[in-house]
Amino acid sequence: MNARATRLAILNAARRLFVEQGLHGTTTAAVARQARVAVGTLFHHFPSKTVLLEALAADARAHRDAHLGEGVDPRDPVADQLRTVVVGHLRWSIAEPERHRFLELLGATPNVAASPLAAAGGDDVLLGVVERGRREGILRDLPADLLVAIGQRLGATLAAHVSLHPELADDPAFLDQAFAACWGALGRD
């Protein structure tokens, strides 16, 4: 296996184990065993469990953010852009359930949730929409990072529901109501 394939095998094995067994319940030895590599090989690619977690978080966020950026037209009104982000997030959570669950796990694990590791990361798409909405005065007058966090929490809650009911990701009435909930939390009264 070449270095890139080895790294990918380790990441895939680690993500699966972390989702199944939790962050604290998964050892690097178990990840190496699952990836069919030596522990030394794992540490060659990822010098610590924290570095491995950071790589997994970056991977999941990159996949999510690329998906969320599809279809967002900066010329559209803020409400349309936000709706595209909400629907995109719901569809991404179905298309990438393991990556989605991993990000949720980071945010829900004590001691990790408060660390930089669980920070939202470069959610540039949502941040850009929020900043524009604040400038135009159509979103609540709260700090942009707080509005993004609120949007992400709502998005995570909706995605958790949709993961149990995948058919809702294509139900226009549900999507309208999901967007209305997000707009109600972020938009000005």
Image: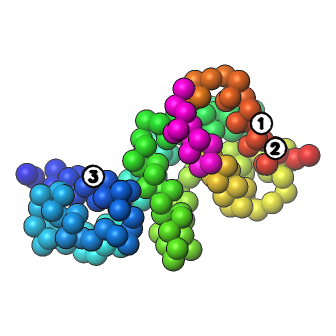
Classify 86 as above or below 145: above
Q: Amino acid at mark 1?
A: Ala
Establish if 172 lies above or below 118.
above
Question: Which residue shows up at 10% across the image and 67% down it?
Answer: 38
On whether residue 108 falls in the magenta region, the answer is no
| 126 vs 143: above or below | above
Q: Dot 1, how many residues are within 10 Å of its Cα: few (below 14), some (14-19), or many (20+)?
A: some
Per the image, label 1 sits on a secondary structure element best described as helix
Foreground of the two, 128 or 49: 49
Q: Position of residue 173 (x, y in %)?
A: 71, 24
Q: Which residue appears at 56% of the width and 74% of the height?
A: 114
Question: Is residue 128 at least partly visible in the picture?
Answer: no
Mark-to-mark CA distance, 3 and 2: 37 Å
Local secondary structure at mark 3: helix
Work out how far the residue at label 2 is from the one at label 1, CA to CA, in angstroms.
6 Å
Please, is residue 47 above or below residue 63 in the view? Answer: below
Q: Give the image location of residue 90, x and y in percent.
A: 56, 37
Q: Which residue is mark 3?
A: 12
Q: Earlier in the sequence, mark 3 or mark 2?
A: 3
Question: Do the residues bearing badges 3 and 1 touch, measured as CB atoms within 8 Å?
Answer: no
Residue 184 in the image: state x and y as whole percent: 81, 43
Q: Which mark is residue 108?
A: none
Residue at image x 24%, y 70%?
28
Q: Residue under circle 2?
A: 184
Determine the main secondary structure of the stretch shown in magenta: helix
Between the residue at mark 3 and the residue at mark 1, the CA separation in whole angstroms equals: 36 Å
Q: Are marks 2 and 1 in contact (CB under 8 Å)?
A: yes
The region drawn magenta spans 156-167
Which label was assigned to residue 180? 1
Q: Residue at x 50, y 46 (%)?
A: 65
Of callouts 3 and 1, the N-terminal one:
3
Q: Residues within 10 Å of mark 3 (few under 14, many from 20)?
A: some
